[in-house]
Amino acid sequence: MPHEPSSTRPHAAAGTALPRIAVCGIHIESSTFTPYVSTAADFDVRRGDAVLDRHPFLAAGSPLREAAAWHGVLHAGALPGGPLDREDFEAWRAEILEGLAALVSGSDGASLDALWFDIHGAMSVRGMDDAEGALITAIREVIGEDVLVGTSMDLHGNVSPALFAGCDQLTCYRTAPHVDVAETRERAVRSLLDALAAAPDGLPAPKPHRALVHVPILLPGEMTSTRVEPAASLYARIPELAAREGVTDVSYWIGFAWADEPRCQAAVVAFGADGEAVDAAALELATAIWETRHEFVFVAPTGTLEECLDTAIASPARPFWISDSGDNPGAGGADDTTGCLAALASRPEIRAGEVTALLVSIVDPETAGRAAELGVGRRGDVVVGGRIDARDPGPVPLHIEVEALDHSPATGVAAVLRVLAPAGGESPSEPRSPELRPTSQRSTGLRPTGLRLVVTSRRAQFSTEAMFARLGLTMTVADVVVVKMGYLEPDQHAAAADWMMALTPGGVDQDLVRLGHRRITRPMLPFDAEIPAPSAADVLR
Ligand SMILES: [Zn+2]
């Protein structure tokens, strides 16, 4: 559909009218190595003012909310998962373009001044290589070149040339774990408002100078946590770089390790009023990253699952936490591989109850539903996990007792299951059975083991004390706590007396070379022994 270029229309920023700012985005991190396919059902989809209400700094009546006429077009956000279904993406894209077209050619004669493109940056869509780049390119065709576009991203997102070309102001988080999400988004919004305030009457906001330098390093978040070096020092340099004369913001994207797409690599972007200062800041940070390229290490001691379990059981530290990192749903893992469950269920110390263990959590709608059907205090037989990612050992049959039940938007049905073992001491696992058997046949002669397991009907991450509390659990309730996570989130980190990361197989395997990327640019660390140093010739503007 044809659209009048915004420069020929009066800008709302002129005179006393408030600037018109649209907000839209699709926010998900997608592993292309997981069998899971994300669909609209996984997303929180918002329209109108609900798009703004996700942000405390844009609460009704707040100074930033009052500073512009905001238009929430559409925002869809989900827990990390697999690639997004193409039809769902196309439907949202059409709705976003339609909404923006209506704003650009508004019946009140005002045009659009700015767009806040609120995305994660590592969304994969089936059949596409650069979904966010394609989306912003389509958006530009509708809104024109004059509208100021700012984006705030997760530092695990990717900055493709198309995304860079479509955005005037790009920024991302400076912490991992991400404790500066709201701060980053607010910074992006303030940058937009500042630029609009600097616009001459009746004219579009001046565009900043921008510089992008890619650094061909692809690393998991677990080797680039800002809790440890060298990422801690690299991110600590940013405030000084961003405070320089003529520089507005400087950002460092780690990039997303678990997608096999040409855009996946680290990136630095700077923007501001002074082109030379912007270029220098971007190249300086990119060079600093390059200089530390061989220093990135895991954020915690690592080992195979068995090595981690041996250490945890022998350790005096309680609770001892273990991350099942290859199936971390927070990075896009299926959330239902069963290697950890089978290993915990067969450890003699745990079966005997000498060591208590808690596995949090496995997505299994069937088992969660079965637990809800049974009710608290009832026993039954279930087959847990392996429905999405069926890799060895696949679904695990268990005798269980339901200890607690809950229902929340984040988890769907959630159940705490106590794993039971035959009183006589035979294996707690029966041979695999495709269907669930009635309680009455199996519930006699069983005793509790030391193992408890949480199952949910939705993919979920128990990252906060509050989520444990909903099920009557605490983060220190067991000697050994196994979580489907990579690095631990703040509450978990505080609760863990000690911690190891199990380098388990899965859709977000920490061993990238073992995963087998084929389509990334080369040379790239860690796939190649060396990469060239960034130079002035590598600066994209
Ligand atoms: Zn992230």
Image (cartoon, helix red, strand yellow):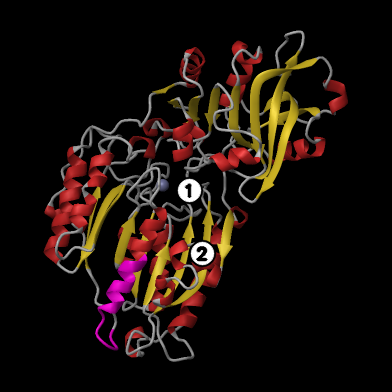
Q: Nearer the viewer, residue 426 or 201?
A: 201
**Magenta part of the chain:** 189-203
Residue at 33%, 70% in the rendered image:
192
Q: Which residue is mark 1?
A: 30
Q: Amino acid at mark 1?
A: Ser
Q: Nearer the viewer, residue 432 or 315?
A: 315
Residue 244 is inside the magenta segment = no
- The answer to whether one can see residue 523 in this image is no
Residue at 57%, 56% in the rendered image:
43
Would residue 183 be found to the left or right of residue 382 on screen?
left
What is the crowding at mark 1: few (fewer than 14 residues within 10 Å), some, or many (at least 20)? Answer: many
Residue 428: x percent and y percent? Answer: 71, 17
Would residue 255 be found to the left or right of residue 66 on screen?
left
The prevailing secondary structure element of the residues shown in magenta is helix
Residue at 44%, 26% in the rendered image:
499
Residue 107: x percent and y percent? Answer: 49, 90
Residue 532: x percent and y percent? Answer: 17, 42
Q: Nearer the viewer, mark 1 or mark 2?
A: 2
Q: Which element is circle 2 on?
A: strand
Q: Which element is circle 1 on?
A: loop
| Residue 273 in which image quadrant | bottom left
Q: Amino acid at mark 2?
A: His
Q: Which residue is mark 2?
A: 75
Against 444, residue 436 (above or below) is below
Would residue 65 be found to the left or right of residue 234 on screen?
right
Closer to the chain start, of discs 1 and 2, is: 1
What is the crowding at mark 2: few (fewer than 14 residues within 10 Å), some, or many (at least 20)? Answer: many
